[in-house]
Image (cartoon, rainbow, N blue to C red):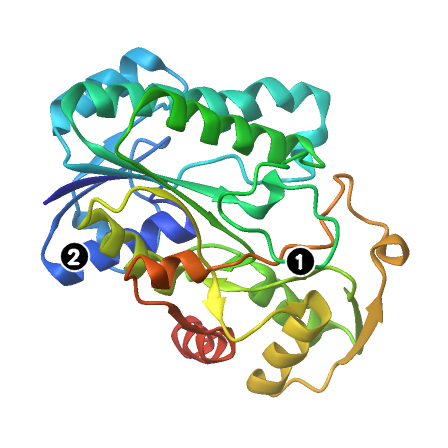
Amino acid sequence: MRVLVTGVNGQLGHDVMLELVRRGYKGIGSGSGEAYRGTDDLAVMPYIPLDITDQDDVNRVIMATAPDTVIHCSAWTAVDAAEEKENRTKVFALNTSGPEYLAKACKAVGAKMIYLSTDYVFNGQGTIPWKPDDRNYAPLNVYGQSKLEGELSVAGNMENYFIVRTSWVFGINGTNFISTMIRLGKAHDTVRVVSDQIGTPTYTKDLARLLVDMSETEKYGTYHVTNEGGYCSWFEFCQEVYRQYGLETQIIPVTTAEFGLNRAVRPFNSRLDKSKLSSAGFEPLPDWQDAIGRYLKEAQL
């Protein structure tokens, strides 16, 4: 199986490539840079520069690589910066137009496509977990709207697709909540962490395994994927990180309003219903508490 992976310079794309290598598949990395930037020995992997906002470039790369599957991990993920007026054109080019170009190119060559999306496509209200087939989207911010439009672009232009919504992602190849909180915890006696936003963390290494599992099937559709282990707040997430890491920094729970540092509106309810995974025969991800331990061991922060 030949798999083209976009965004290999980021956390998830990097781990998808490692998973492909582990299984003996032909992985081809792509990104906006001229060369691969990241950890491990992936610098020797096949790598192709790709501007997903350029339809001609997308067509060229898809035709040249002839993939069986495209796993699309590339995206604008700077949620607060997406709110700035001068960035919005680029945000929608990356998160909406790019996926549309990829979907059309994949359909032309008969390739499958896996599009990574987010709980931010929903309005973040209530306490009931969002189901994959819920349609009451109403995203709260520019990032969420751009990702929703990306989903619609993929679904509207091809049939052989997976849309995978996830949340609270952390991985080795980049900065994330865990690495940031450990850095802050080492530098300060106290840290403030939001306690009224509820969701589930996701380790990119575990998510990568599932994405490659999906690419081996034709069980197309929209799925929700996070680690197991139940729901938590960012405050409780940080508590578990510090417990496992051995930091005694005091964590002060605050409301989103009290925290007050985010430009983009955040969802309070990021709970995702993952039952469709099991019903489709996919193996769930391990508990997020276990994932933290494995990440800390590998990251050596």
Local packing at callout 2 (Cα closer than 10 Å; few below 14, some 14-19, many 20+) is some
Horizontal side, residue 284 vs residue 24: left or right: right
Towards the viewer: 21 or 290? 290
Q: CA distance from mark 1 to mark 2?
A: 38 Å
Residue 290 shows up from this direction = yes
CB atoms of marks 1 and 2 within 8 Å: no
Relative vertical location of residue 19 with respect to residue 8 in this rendering, above or below? below
Please report the residue visible at 71 percent of the width from the left and 59 percent of the height from the top: 127
Compare marks 1 and 2 and give the one earlier in the sequence: 2
Residue 146, percent across and down?
57, 28
Towards the viewer: 90 or 203? 203
Furthest-right residue in view? 258
Furthest-top residue in view? 56
Residue 8, percent across and down?
33, 44
Relative vertical location of residue 24 with respect to residue 102 in this rendering, above or below? below
Nearer to us of marks 1 and 2 is: 1
Residue 91, percent across and down?
56, 26
Residue 300, percent across and down?
45, 75
Horizontal side, residue 60 vs residue 14: left or right: left
The image quarter containing residue 168 is: bottom right
Q: State the SS at label 2.
A: helix
Look at label 1 and name its amino acid. Ile
Look at label 2 and name its amino acid. Val
The N terminus - image quarter? top left
Q: State the SS at label 1.
A: loop
Q: Which residue is mark 2?
A: 21
Q: Which residue is mark 1?
A: 128
Relative vertical location of residue 294 with respect to residue 172 in this rendering, above or below? below
Local packing at callout 1 (Cα closer than 10 Å; few below 14, some 14-19, many 20+) is few
Residue 205 shows up from this direction = no
